[in-house]
Image: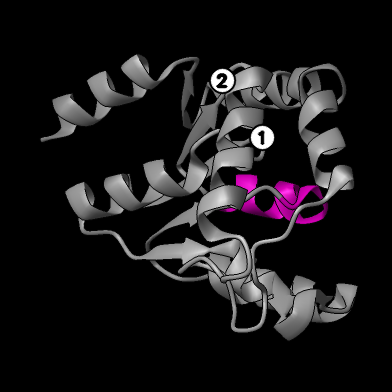
Amino acid sequence: MKRALVLGSGGSGKTTFAVRLARLTGLPLIHLDSHYWLPNWQKRSDDEWASIVRELVSRDCWIMDGNYGGTLDERLKACDTVFFLDVPRGQCLSRVLRRQLLNGGRARAEMPEGCAERFSLEFLAWIWTYPTRRRGPILERLEGLRSDRLVHVFRSDAEIDHFLDRLR
């Protein structure tokens, strides 16, 4: 494993898993959120974002944490391993709400300056509809990759912990 993607719904534990994986492997960790967002939650232009992603995936090794469907094809082509955190939506929602309570008004470590944690009904709706709108297409794409890439689908924290314990 030299280039690994970590995908999943908001609140699935992508960042936590990616940090733990990076510590165990020594691979550099890339949080896509920190490259996509500008201060005060301003989005980069599509062209600028595409250029940044091209540069990031061209690096020799990495663990990349984040979804961003518009650049997923390019990242899937560049990776050798994919981790999809396919955890229940209720767990994702409770984690996001807890994160909001704990970090509300402050930016998380992986976020750019000026992007304080915020409550958004749009984000909660994205998480709620993730299993019905995004999960199936992602699983289909990952199934098509299995012949030439390692694909891990985790459906629980116990499965994640078991995998990380075996890496030690």
In this rendering, the answer to whether 79 lies above or below 164 is below
* Residue at which label 2 appears: 87
The rendered magenta stretch, by its main secondary structure, is classed as helix
Q: Residue at x 60, y 29 (%)?
A: 94
> Of helix, strand and loop, which one carries label 2?
loop
Residues at circles 2 and 1 in contact by the CB criterion of under 8 Å = yes
Under mark 2, the amino acid is: Val
Decide if residue 85 is in sight here. yes
Residue 50 locus on image (x, y percent): 77, 71
The quarter holding residue 138 reads top right
Name the residue tied to disc 1.
Answer: 9
Q: In x, y percent, where is residue 44?
A: 82, 78
Magenta region: which residues?
Answer: 68-78
Looking at the image, is 126 positioned above or below residue 89? below
In the rendered image of this protein, does residue 149 appear above or below residue 22?
Answer: above
Sort mark 2 into few (<14), some (14-19) or many (20+) by Cα contacts within 10 Å.
Answer: some
Q: Quadrant of the N terminus?
A: top left
The numbered mark, 2 or 1, whose residue comes first in the sequence reads 1
Q: Residue 24 versus residue 2: which sits nearer the camera?
A: 24
